[in-house]
Image (spheres, grey):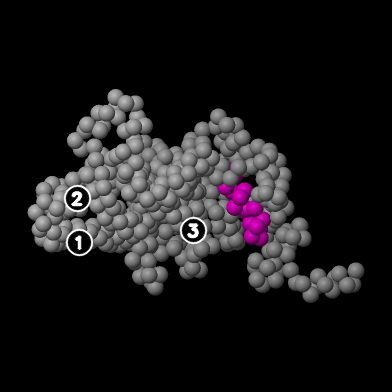
Amino acid sequence: MIKFITANKWFNNTHVLKNINLEISKGEVIVICGPSGAGKSTLLRTINKLELIDDGEIIVDGMYLSDPKTDLTALRAEIGMVFQHFNLYPHKTAIKNITLAPRKVRGLNRKKATERALKLLEKVGLVHKRDAFPVQLSGGEQQRVAIARSLAMEPKIMLFDEPTSALDPELINEVLDVMVSLAKEGMTMIVVTHEIGFAQKVADRVVFMDAGEILEVGTPPDIFVNPQHPRTKSFMSSVFHIPIFDEKQEEEQESSS
Amino acid sequence: MMITGVKITLILLATTTVTSLCLGTVIAIMRISRIRIFHILGNLYVEIFRNIPGLFLILFFYFVFPEVLPSSIGAKLNAYLYYPVVAGILGLTIDNASYVSDILRSGRLSIPHGQRDAAISTGLSRVQQYLYVLLPQMYRTALPPLGTRMVHNFKNTSLCMAITAPELTWATQQIESLTFRGIEATSIATLFYIVLAGIMVSVIILLEKILKIDVSSITHSKTL
């Protein structure tokens, strides 16, 4: 479904993506994690060409992104994206946020678009907020509307860019629940997140990135419990707060050897 | 004469408000554009016309513009009874649009990047991004300074008296010089200007209130 072939990107002199090779098949749920500045968001944004790569190739559903003939609108219509800061249109109500793209890009009439939007609002549990403006919604509600907005285009792939990191801890679960149900329906999902619980529940593979490189790819237990790369180890131990790797023991081992 | 003056002033106000808003929007989008030539032309427009006095532009369109055009068209324009009004509209539009574009540009800059990202990622074309996502927000944020600018433009319509457009200030002057009833004429004109500007300001405040229903509740939702 998505294939990165030695993709490289520079921001001025900073090498933000280094020789990315990754293949994601249909229906797979991929979680990308890593420290900030690792290039996770940039990697995500190259898939729908919000960012361009300077070298290499990305193929999405048979479309070559470097090919100038690739229809960008068609590409983007197939890829839904959910952002850290929701990015709902503040001047439109929840339902209008959702119906805008289906009407203008897919050419649906108002009635059909509204029907579809209501179905999606039901799915995320927010039908009663259909006429609310974004500022009248909590963060969790805004993010659920944002997910519904992306789904309204009936995408084949969903990208999530730290969807819960701007939320109060209490509101995180309502968003994760929607994402879990989406994953169970077989949606191809790429999620940048540090929600380990979510990753363990639904991720098929976890990608660990640092300094623009993919350091490790594996199943959630591989990466979280039994990481191989030293950078992954130190990152995981700080993410879990409770040190899984007993540092004292390690030091002892090191000193004894 | 006074009534004609009021009519002409209203015509000048209504047309230039609309035309300068349209032209200002186009110039603002050109200035934001990543296409270099548009960007340069837009900036050039603002730098030139914002630095020329409005009165000068009005005089230009009345006296010089018909001369620059091919003589047949120029002569027709000069003969046209309402050409002073047309020249006034052109001058005021060109002048006001430079300010409007700058106000709208600052409105655009205040919109977070994420709005555009969201619009792009749902597949909206560039024109659609502006039409449905960016422009509505630009006008909203820019409304207070835009309103002030439009009131300023309303007052600038009096400059058209210099080219004998029969608007209110010109009419007042005429009445004064023909009948010597300057105090009455000036008082009526003053009252008219104050009332009309007052109406404009009220409309703007009302618009702000309507558009900011949701914004005023930001504080409310944050305390929840």
Going 22% across and 59% down the picture, which residue do you hit? Answer: B197
- Which label sits on residue B194? 1
Q: Is residue B102 above or below residue A1?
A: below
Instruction: Specify few, some or many for label 1: CA neighbours under 10 Å numbering under 14, 14-19, or 20 or more.
Output: few
Reading the chain from its start, which is encountered first: label 1 or label 2?
2
The amino acid on which the numbered mark 1 sits, given as a three-letter code, is Ile
Query: Which residue in the protein does label 2 denote?
Result: B170
Q: Residue A217 or B77: which is nearer the viewer?
A: B77
Q: Is residue A173 left or right of residue A9?
A: left
Q: Position of residue A248 (x, y in %)?
A: 79, 75
How busy is the neighbourhood of tag 2: few (under 14 within 10 Å), some, or many (20 plus)? many
Q: Is residue A35 magenta?
A: yes
Q: Quadrant of residue B198?
A: bottom left
Which amino acid type is shown beneath numbered disc 3? His
Mark 2 vs mark 3: tell me if same chain.
no
Marks 1 and 3 on same chain: no
Q: CA distance from mark 1 to mark 3?
A: 45 Å
- Give the structural element (helix, strand or loop) at label 3: loop
Subunit under mark 3: A
Q: Which one is in front, B70 or B118?
A: B70
Residue B73, placed above or below residue A15: above
Numbered range of the magenta stretch: A32-48
